[in-house]
Image (cartoon, rainbow, N blue to C red):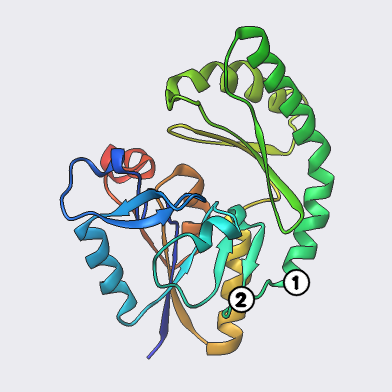
Amino acid sequence: MLKKFLFADLDDTLFQTFEKCGGAEALEPAAFYQDGSVCSYTTRAQRAFLSFVQDGMTVIPTTARDHGALRRVNLPFTSWAVIDYGGVILEPGGGVDRPWLERMREAMSAALPGLQELAAHMDAHAARSGYAGRTRMIEDFATPFFLVLKDPERNAARLAPIEHEIVRPWIADGDKPYCVHRNGNNLAILPKALDKANAVAHVTRQLRAEHGDIVTFGMGDSRSDARFMAACDYAIIPRGTQLAGLTVEAL
């Protein structure tokens, strides 16, 4: 029998914040902030789904979370993990895939000056307009990967002017090798070299080298997840998500 692997995004796919639980009952904590307070919850249906797929399938987290944030997820993952939007791959047992990390460090070093330039433009615009939000460079394993901006008061609509007046025109000027990931109150700017799909393809090659023919599934909630899901044999989309609204719910 072929071994089965599910590459699964985490936030808004296997769990979500309390506000996004829609009044569901029987919630259980799934992820935590650094101070130990609860960040996200699972619903009864999500727990049933995870139990179902783990009975005969290996679940591989495929997430934007960094290493520290992954360790604060209270779900039973025991195999590979793809983190930092694909910038870092963790092997079974938790060790870092060093050849992959070195490859990504080289690509991120080339992308860093552009990210720094864009961050300066975004923060200058925020200062001029009186906007309280500021960009953060997300780093892990001593490597800067991408920029993120979140509205301090979780008013996602206030990110639109920065996205459309600053970020997208900057990228379009010269067709710079960066892309925008926008989902709710999360505005992220990534080098095009940073892609979950590339990391999933790399892990899939390792799995096939070890197990021979396998079956792969991809699961995610956002437009940016579609690329790695398309690299898998089958795709799973939670209802009510950004990606569902663009695909199955749009029909």
Residue 91 is tagged as: 2
Q: Nearer the viewer, residue 93 or 86?
A: 93
Q: Position of residue 189 (x, y in %)?
A: 63, 36
Q: Nearer the viewer, residue 101 or 168?
A: 101
Q: Are marks 2 and 1 in contact (CB under 8 Å)?
A: no
17 left or right, relative to 70: left
Q: Quadrant of residue 171?
A: top right
170 left or right, relative to 50: right
Locate the C terminus and report the quarter of the image it occupies: top left
The residue that disc 1 covers is 98
Residue 54 can be seen in this image:
yes
**SS state under label 2:** loop
Above or below, comparing residue 192 to residue 55 in the picture: above
92 left or right, relative to 99: left
**SS state under label 1:** helix
Amino acid type indicated by mark 1 = Arg
Q: Earlier in the sequence, mark 2 or mark 1?
A: 2
**Residue at horizontal 40 percent and vertical 72 percent from the top:** 76
Q: Nearer the viewer, residue 113 or 2?
A: 113
Rounded to the nearest angstrom, the CA distance separating label 2 from label 1 is 10 Å
Seen from this angle, which residue lies furthest front? 35
**Residue at horizontal 31 percent and vertical 52 percent from the top:** 41
Above or below, comparing residue 146 to residue 196 in the picture: above
- Could you tell me how many numbered marks the image carries? 2
Residue 151 is tagged as: none
Above or below, comparing residue 225 to residue 127 in the picture: below
